Each structure stands twice: as C-alpha cells, then as structure tokens.
Image (cartoon, grey):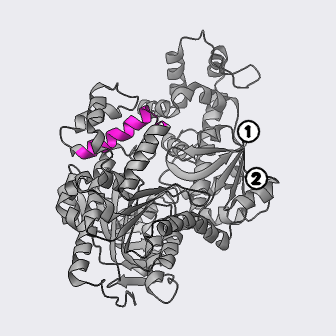
Amino acid sequence: MRRDMREQRTGDGRDAVTLYRRTYTTILRSSGDIPVRALTAAHCEMRSSLHPHAADPSTIDTGALLYAMHRLPDCIDTVSRILLAQLPAQFAAALGHSLDGWAKVQAPARRRLWNYDGAHTLAVHLTSPSDLDDVIPTLVAYQIEWNKLHQRIALAPDLRERLITAGLLTRDGASGPLASHHLDLGHLAEALRSHLRIPSDEWARLVVAWGSRFWSRLAAVASRERNMTVRLIGGTHVAYAKVVDHWWRPVLRQLERRRLLGRPLYFVSSNPHGLVNLCSGYVRRRADRLWEFLARAPEDAEGEIATLRHATSWANRDNVLYYANRLWSKLHPWDSEERARRTAEEEARGIWHIPAGDGADVAAQIIELRRLRPDDLDPRLQEVAPALLASPAVILNIDYPLGLAAYRILRTVAESVDTLRGIYIVGKAATLNGAVGDVLISNVVYDEHSQNRYSFPNALSYQDVAPFMARGSVLDHQQAVTVRSPFLQNPEYLDLFYREHYTVVEMEAGPYLSAIYEATQPTRHPIGDTIHFRTLPFDLGLIHYASDTPYTRAWTLGGRSLSFAGIDATYASLVAVLRRIAQVETATARTGRRRPHRPAAVKVA
C-alpha cells in the first residue's frame, strides 16, 4: 500500500499537484510582493477537481468562483495586496505599524483571522502551513474567474453599452452606481447570463451568493481586471509554535482558574455549539419560542425555514430546535442581556467558553460533567446521564482546526495535560462512495503530510451512531486520506485514492494521528511508514459527516451551507461521542483505574 501511494506517479495527477505546491512555496520565499498571476499557469496545469475549467477562457467556472468567494471575506473585491504572516509583530515589522485600527473581517465558510485596512490591503493570519495550501489556491482561483468574467464582458460592446445605460459603468470604464430609473434589470441580467454562457441554475446560485451586492459586484468585475499581489512574512516553524502557544494560554488559565487541570480530560474536536446544545438545555428551555418562530417566520432567501418546517415530519425534534435556534439568532441578533443570560445559565452548569484570540482562530469550550443537570441533557443522553453526572471528568471541545494546526494543537494539549482519557475527532469530509449527510467512520488514514498510513481501533462504530440518524447512511470500516487542501486534488488523484479503497477525503485526521503518535512514543512521528495503534492509553474515536461529493462536483461544494442534512449527521455523531464517554467513565469507575498503558504503536514493515 505504501509503495502504491508514495511511488505511483505516472498519470495519477500527483506530479501536477506537487509542482503547483512547490511553485508557490518557493516563490513566496521572496522578500517582496509577488503577483498572483505568477501562479496561474501551475494552478491551471494541476487540473483541480474544484476548478476543472481554470485553463478555459471561454468557460466561467461558477463552482470554483463560488467556492473561492465563500472562503474569502467580502472586502476581497477591493483588495489588491495580501500579506500573510503568523504573528502580529511580523505584520508590524513589515508595515511599520501595528494592525490596531484595521477591521476584523470574516469569510462565510472559512474560519481564519483576517484584518482589512479599509482600502486595498488584507492581512491574513497563518496558523500552520495548511493555511498557505488553502489560501493561495483560493486566491488564484478567485482572480482567474474574475478576470474571465471581465474579459468576456469587455469583448461585448453592445453589452457594455447596456451596462453604461444602466449606470453600472461610466464611459471611461469605471464602475458606477445603478441608475435608479433603470427598470429593465431582468432583461439585462438575462443578457449577461446568456453572453457569459453560464447555465441558469449556476447563475441563480451566483445571484444568491452576491445578494444585495449583485449589481455593484458585476459593475466592479466589468470595470477592471484583478492583479493582486501576495507576500509571505516569516513562515518559520518556531512562529507556528508560538501561534498555538498564544491560543493555548487562555484555555490553560481557565482550566487552572476552575481547578480542573488535574481532572480526567476528554479532548473533542468538533464545532463550538453541538456539545453545548446537547448538555446545557439552553435551546430546549426556549422550545416554545422557537416552535412559534418556525410557525410564523417568513421564508428566508435560501428557503431554510421552509426546509426546517418540512423536516419536523421526519427528523429528530431536538435537532430541529437546535437548527431553528441558529436561524432565530441570524434574524434576531442577540443583545447584551440575552448574551449575559446565556453565559450565566451555561456557567452555572459548568460550561465555559473561550473565544478565539490572537493566535489560532479556534474557539474552545470546557464542560465539567458533574455540574451538568439531568433535566437539561438531550433526551438521547438520558440513559447515560448517571454516568456522566457522576464523573469528575472534563471535556475540552475545540472548533476543529484546519490541517496541520490540528497536529500542533493536540500536541500542545498533550504536553500540558497528563490525564487524557479520550480523544474524539468529529469533522467534515468529502465522500467518494456516499452522499451528503452520511456519517463516515474510518479505521485507516493515509496522511499526505507525513506520508504515513495509520490504522487504529476506532472506538466508534455503526451501532453507536445509526440509532440516532433520521436519514442518511452510516458507513464504518472506511479508509480516509488526509489531503493538504480541497483545491490540491484532481480527478486522477481522486481515482488513485479510490482504487486503493480510500473513500473519505478530509484534512485533519492525519495530523491528529501524528500528534497521538508523539504523545505515546519516545520519538517524533516517522515519515512514510505504516503504523498500527494496537492499544492506546486513552480512547480514540474518529468520525466524519459527508459535506461534499467531489466525483459528481455536487453544488454543495461552496454553493451553500451543509444545511439540515449536516445538522442531523453532526448531532448523531456527537450523541455517540457523549454516550461513549459515559461508557468509558462507567468502565473506569468499575475497575477503579485508568486503562492500562501498553505499547501504543508498531511500525509495520
């Protein structure tokens, strides 16, 4: 297996991916600004599964454009210079001043720290090398598709004249405000769509994604080409370690402040709301308000409320409530009193939130099990409530990080905590054999970073999750591959994985397993080995829910949020994790000791 994955090169697409990554990592060693267009040729040559029409100037790849847009902040439309660094001091040294006063901006579908100067410069905070593998291809794809749109409009004089008449362009080519008297927008939009040769369904997705800024963005696209530059400042191994150290300090302080540091600890990597909703009862105590909201609220632009109303006929009602609370919060921004009320209710139940700080953009929650209240627990947990409430253990949940940041975070936690009793990874993945909303449980992981093949006894299986799934499949005994970035894949590469029976494509499992190796062995994780974890001194569970189907280029790839299908799978997975923790606590209380520490891993020749 190792020979196949590491040495098979001809025709499998790996050379093109490797060349692209080598291109931008070496170019970014320069001490100056680098034009994004310098990376266009290598990006196109890679033939990414997310960007199959990159090299075709006559085809607007709407899927790639939407994917990139959702992973960049809105201000990217005006940005011409991107600075990438790890620490605030690095930005200050390059700019001659700190980032104080720069706006903090967000991307709809990618958690990362961004600062915008309000004009043309964007500062991107890097947590690990995986951020480079994510940001750079995203920027290149965005610029390629923007410039295609611009070129196609520029080559149509009649269309440009209509844009000038509508007030979207001036005679000298600058963008302008939409003329208030121009009422024929439907015909203008259809003329644009037809000329750009964008299918109707993809055009509709673009209209929804741009929302109220649709015409102003089209005006900006028509007025100019993009020629962004990027510059990497720092990028050292030590600086990445400092970033995670900055992230860990407030978490450690909270554990010390609550006198929880010596308690048995379960590390969970999931999302910032799932476990809290299952344990706190905050949402369920407001059920009447939320059911009334669903009954009376107007349907929103994406139809989420209508979808949720329909889901009440088949889905778990508590899952519906959790999702309804999310929608309610979007339409009714919290005031300070409501935030304070929720904080007080959760802290009274032993739940503390640590927001993302100056380091990694990874929020964390601490849950002290014995302070939870039985009536607050989700009904699916009532059976195991006595074991949870009798436990002295603590759950540390982190908002799952990107790529190699997972390795650094878990390694840092393991260095500081001597009482790890369980590690559970719950994240999103692409599936090569399933459908969106399925749950995928793997016991083999090939890691592109270390080129190691890890196998392990997964503490979670079909029977742990399936009883809590209203729809969708639960596929266990799967094999996962940890890739460097969603863009750094092509059809040949995916075929190679699938031929070797790898059906789950994700970004964190390999780095987590490398950290687990170093937490249980006297050496750093190897490179290019096959490693089997026979037994571990803690419980280990790995589970994913399917968010994408790259073989079919499903429109879920950046076109919208995972929606309720993902909520159903997420909560089924997290219920399984909490029930597993209860099982471990019961077994520990019965034996009176922790699980025996045996040799954790063996290398397989």
Relative vertical location of residue 103 with respect to residue 25 in this rendering, above or below: above
When asked about the image quadrant of residue 478, the answer is: bottom left
When asked about the image quadrant of residue 544, the answer is: bottom left
Relative vertical location of residue 171 with respect to residue 88 in this rendering, above or below: above
Q: Which residue is nearer to you in this view: 593 or 602?
A: 593
| Image mark count | 2
Residue 200 percent coordinates (x, y): 43, 29
The residue at which mark 2 appears reads as 98
Give the spatial CA distance, label 1 vs label 2. Answer: 16 Å
Which of the two marks, 1 or 2, is nearer to us in this view? 2
Please name the residue shown 77% across and 23% down the image: 172
The three-letter amino acid code for the residue at tag 1 is Ala
Residue 605 percent coordinates (x, y): 40, 90
Q: Which residue is nearer to you in this view: 66 or 45?
A: 66
Relative vertical location of residue 111 with respect to residue 563 in this rendering, above or below: below
Q: Residues within 10 Å of mark 2 (few under 14, many from 20)?
A: some
- Quarter containing the N terminus: bottom left
Residue 131 shows which numbered tag?
A: none
Bounds of the magenta segment: 318-335
Disc 1 + disc 2, Cβ < 8 Å: no
Residue 383 percent coordinates (x, y): 17, 61
Is residue 454 highlighted in magenta? no
Q: Is there any visible trace of residue 236 in the rendered image?
A: yes
Please name the residue shown 48% across and 51% down the image: 50
Residue 274 percent coordinates (x, y): 35, 53
Q: Is residue 522 left or right of residue 432?
A: right
Most frequent secondary structure within the magenta stretch: helix
The residue at which mark 1 appears reads as 119
